[in-house]
Image (cartoon, rainbow, N blue to C red):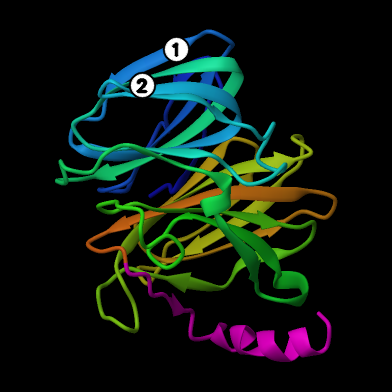
C-alpha cells in the first residue's frame, strides 16, 4: 500500500489523491485576495491552520475577521480556527492565503467555533544534536487542555538542515495506556527553500517499508506503523502533524531497536548539543 502523495496547489480546494486512513482527512485551501470557499463540516470537526496570509471566517453566523498574520510557515506561530461538526462556514481571503484543514469524525454538537491565537501555541525543542527539532503545539490536551475538541490533535515541527525528526521512530497503533495510545497520523510538508527536499521513512510490523522524497506540499499518511523524517543538508522541512483516535491522550512506543537513541537526549544536552 502507498502511504504518501503530492498535493496540487491550485486555487481553491486541493485534496490527497489517496487516503489509507479511516478517521483523518485533509484539505489544502489556496485562495487569492477576495476569493472565498464555503462548505458544511457535516459530521467532522476541522482545524483551519493558517499557513500564510489572512482570511475572514464566518461559521454558523459567527464572524472572525482577518485571522492570520505570518507570511509563511517558517515565519512565526500560526493562527488557527476550530470549525465544529454540523457547521456551515465560509472563508474569504484577505490578500493571498494558504490554509491547512485537517479533519476527523466528531459527534460533539455543542462545541462552539473559536480562534487559537499565536499566544496560545506552545513551543519548544525535542531531541538533541542532529535529531534536534523545534515544535509548536496548537491543539493538544497537554498544552491546551482548555480548548475543546473531539478527536483532533494538531501541531507543527521544524526540522533544521541535515537533522532527523520524529527520531527514534515511534508508533501509536493500539490503546494500551500508559504504554501506547491508538492514533492515526498525517504529516503535511513545506520545504525551505521550496526547491529542496527531505526523506520520510515509514515501516510497520506487517513488513511494509517505504521511503519517499518529501517535497513542498506533500503529505504522509500513517494509519499505523513507525515513521521518521530527515531534512537534506541546506534545506529545512516543516510538517503540520495531526492525529485522531479514540481519545486525545497521547502515548507512543519507540522502535525497540532504536529506542536507546532517545535515552541519550539528556546527556547530549548536558554536553551542549
Do the numbered discs 1 and 2 sit on residues whose CB atoms are within 8 Å? no
Q: Which image quarter: residue 258?
A: bottom right
Quote the CA–CA distance across marks 1 and 2.
Answer: 11 Å
Return the residue found at the far top: 34
The disc placed on residue 58 is 2
Position of 144 with respect to 8 (left or right) is left
Task: Look at the picture and state if 66 lies above or below 251.
Answer: above
Is residue 58 a member of the stretch shown in magenta? Answer: no
The residue positioned 38% from the left and 50% from the top of the image is 1
- Is label 1 in a helix, a strand or a loop? strand
Residue 144, position in %: x, y?
A: 42, 60
Between 179 and 118, the residue placed more toward the observer is 118
The residue positioned 47% from the left and 21% from the top of the image is 56
Task: Look at the picture and state if 169 lies above or below 231.
Answer: below
Is residue 263 a member of the stretch shown in magenta? Answer: yes
Position of 195 with respect to 117 (left or right) is right
Q: Which image quarter: residue 200?
A: bottom right
Q: Which image quarter: residue 27?
A: top left
Residue 21, position in %: x, y?
A: 31, 48
Q: Residues within 10 Å of mark 1 (few under 14, many from 20)?
A: some
The residue positioned 52% from the left and 53% from the top of the image is 120
Span of residues in magenta: 249-273
Q: Quadrant of the C terminus?
A: bottom right
Of the image marks 1 and 2, the number of the one nearer the N terminus:
1
The residue positioned 58% from the left and 12% from the top of the image is 32
Q: Residues within 10 Å of mark 2 (few under 14, many from 20)?
A: some
Pointer 1: what residue? 36
Residue 43, position in %: x, y?
A: 18, 36
Position of 128 with respect to 166 (left or right) is right
Amino acid at each position: 500500500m502507498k502511504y504518501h502523495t503530492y498535493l496540487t496547489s491550485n486555487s481553491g480546494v486541493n485534496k490527497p489523491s489517496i487516503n489509507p486512513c479511516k478517521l483523518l482527512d485533509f484539505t489544502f485551501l489556496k485562495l487569492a485576495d477576495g476569493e472565498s470557499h464555503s462548505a458544511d463540516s457535516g459530521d467532522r470537526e476541522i482545524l483551519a491552520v493558517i499557513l500564510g496570509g489572512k482570511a475572514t471566517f464566518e461559521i454558523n453566523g459567527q464572524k472572525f475577521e482577518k485571522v492570520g498574520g505570518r507570511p509563511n510557515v517558517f515565519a512565526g506561530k500560526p493562527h488557527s480556527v476550530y470549525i465544529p461538526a454540523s457547521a456551515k462556514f465560509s472563508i474569504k481571503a484577505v490578500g493571498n492565503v494558504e490554509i491547512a484543514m485537517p479533519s476527523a469524525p466528531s459527534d460533539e454538537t455543542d462545541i462552539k467555533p473559536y480562534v487559537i491565537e499565536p499566544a496560545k501555541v506552545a513551543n519548544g525543542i525535542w531531541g538533541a544534536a542532529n535529531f534536534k527539532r523545534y515544535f509548536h503545539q496548537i491543539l493538544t490536551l497537554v498544552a491546551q487542555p482548555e480548548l475543546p475538541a473531539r478527536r483532533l490533535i494538531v501541531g507543527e515541527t521544524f526540522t533544521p538542515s541535515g537533522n532527523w525528526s520524529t527520531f527514534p521512530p515511534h508508533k501509536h497503533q493500539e490503546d494500551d495506556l500508559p504504554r501506547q495510545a491508538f492514533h492515526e497520523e498525517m504529516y503535511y510538508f513545506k520545504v525551505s527553500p521550496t526547491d529542496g527536499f527531505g526523506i520520510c521513512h515509514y515501516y510497520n510490523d506487517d513488513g511494509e517499508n517505504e521511503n519517499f522524497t518529501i517535497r513542498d506540499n506533500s503529505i504522509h499518511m500513517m494509519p499505523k506503523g513507525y515513521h521518521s523524517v530527515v531534512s537534506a543538508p541546506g534545506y529545512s522541512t516543516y510538517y503540520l502533524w495531526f492525529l485522531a483516535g479514540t481519545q486525545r491522550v497521547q502515548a507512543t512506543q519507540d522502535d525497540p531497536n532504536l529506542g536507546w537513541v532517545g535515552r541519550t537526549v539528556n546527556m547530549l544536552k548536558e554536553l551542549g548539543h
